Image (spheres, grey):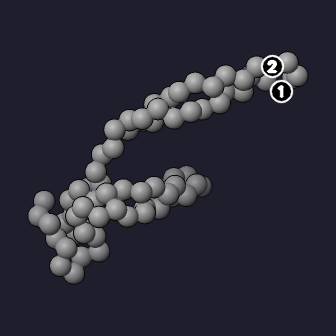
Amino acid sequence: MPDSTAGGMFQVGKSYEFRMIEGDDEVVFLGDVEAYEHPLLKIRDVPERPIPIRLMHGDAPGEQSVQAPQMVPR
């Protein structure tokens, strides 16, 4: 896709904050524009990275929690 920045909303190579509605939730993320030709926008893929999560097993006293790294889905 050609670099279409003249009069366009996005510039290739720049980072933007994007907001999407998924179900009843608003999701906000940052992305770098890889290609833009109105109305098509390609956001640069990012590699998967581990993120910490905490799994809770029950509410009773003495129950243990486990923390394990998980991969961010693409």
Q: Residue at x 53, y 27 (%)?
A: 69
Q: Extreme left residue here?
A: 2
Which mark is on residue 44?
Answer: none
Rendering coords of residue 54 (x, y %): 65, 30
Rendered position, 25 above or below 46: below
The residue to which callout 1 is attached is 59
Rendering coords of residue 29 (x, y %): 45, 55
Label 1 neighbour load within 10 Å: few <14, some 14-19, many 20+: few
Q: Is residue 73 left or right of residue 53?
A: left
Q: Where does the N terminus fall, quadrant-wise?
A: bottom left
The residue to which callout 2 is attached is 63
How far apart in space, not on screen, are marks 2 and 1 (Cα)?
A: 7 Å
Identify residue type, mark 1.
Asp
Q: Where does the C terminus fall, quadrant-wise?
A: top left
Q: Residue at x 47, y 62 (%)?
A: 19
Given residues 55 and 13, the one toward you in this image is: 13
Q: Is residue 45 left or right of residue 54?
A: left
Rendering coords of residue 34 (x, y %): 23, 56
Given residues 7 and 38, the one toward you in this image is: 7
**Residues marked 2 and 1 touching at CB (< 8 Å):** yes
Identify residue type, mark 2.
Glu
Label 2 neighbour load within 10 Å: few <14, some 14-19, many 20+: few
Q: Can I make out residue 41 in this image?
A: no
Q: Can I make out residue 32 in this image?
A: yes
Given residues 63 and 24, the one toward you in this image is: 63
